[in-house]
Amino acid sequence: MSTTVFITPFLKSMPINRLARALRWTFALGLLMLAFHAGLARSAEVVQLRTERTDDGVFLSALISFDIAPAVEDALLKGIPMFFVAEADISRERWYWTDKRVASAARTIRLAYQPLTRRWRINVAAGIVSSSSGLRASLNQSYDTLAEALVAVQRLTRWKIAEAGDIDPGARHELAFSFRLDLSQLPRPFQIGVAGQRDWTIAAEVTQRLDLVPVRSSEFVPKEPVQEAAVK
């Protein structure tokens, strides 16, 4: 009540031109804040998402679109690897209680530059791993350019996220998928310096109904060769 009593005489006593300027600045500031938050939200985007079901399980394919900022590329060229984490959770809807999580999966993708060979290296491992504990990868591939390596980082092809028996055919399920650059894997000085910086914000998430495309196991053939190796 006291605020209203104070502001109303103040606005009445303000000259029209000053009031108009104040309103314009307020409006402009609001637009800038909206643009800033929209820019953060567009740091990465899930442009394709598909789930398939075979006798062997539930598989997810996705395409994430994002750009690497010059600051991130510079850190890569200096030998600092980047760790990207993809996570998928499947929940079964329940009308009488909260939804029940029936399956979870995570994958870590390590992107690094090798100065001696001048090539880019991708290592993919199951789960969320630590840069200090080592990365035991199930897929290791090298690329000539950063652009080629980023294509591999951004594309998830037939990633197994659940067993076939985890899904009840008679129930509705929800899929929550997320992808992010894991800043906690960076060296400690970098973590302090890049915290909150827009250039280092690469994250996207999607929550939607789980729509499974039935696929026969005989049709389920990986598109990329898999090389078994241990990466420390």
Image (cartoon, grey):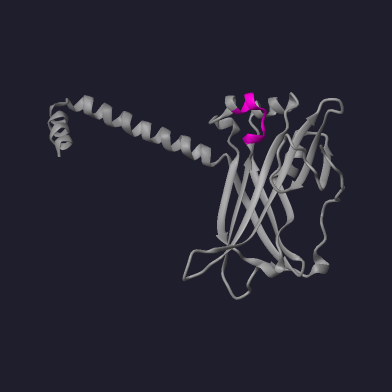
In this view, which residue lies farthest toward the front?
Answer: 133
Question: Residue, x 55% and y 41% (percent of image)?
Answer: 42
Q: Is residue 97 above or below residue 62?
A: below
Residue 76 is left or right of residue 100, and the answer is: right
| Quarter placement of the N terminus | top left
- Where, by quadrant of the figure, is residue 199 drawn? top right
In reply to whether residue 186 is colored magenta, the answer given is yes
Above or below residue 196? Residue 168 is below
Numbered range of the magenta stretch: 183-191
Residue 47's x, y, as percent?
62, 50
Residue 114 picture location, percent across and down? 82, 29
Q: Could you tell me residue 80's position as x and y percent?
A: 72, 28
Which part of the image, by quadrant, shows the C terminus? top right
Left or right position of 33 against 91: left
Residue ID at (53%, 31%):
196
Query: Quarter of the image holding residue 143?
Result: top right
Instruction: Please say whether residue 11 is one of the residues in the magenta stretch.
Output: no
Determine the residue located farthest toward the bottom in the rendered image: 170
Residue 73, percent from left and from top: 69, 28
Image point (71%, 65%), residue name = 163
Write down the quadrant of residue 142 in the picture: top right
Q: Main secondary structure of the magenta part?
A: helix
Relative placement, left or right, of 149 versus 30 is right
Q: Nearer the viewer, residue 108 or 207?
A: 108
Counting the numbered discs, the total is 0
Q: Horizontally, is 33 left or right of 137 in the view? A: left
**Residue drawn at the location 65% of the way across and 66% of the way down:** 212
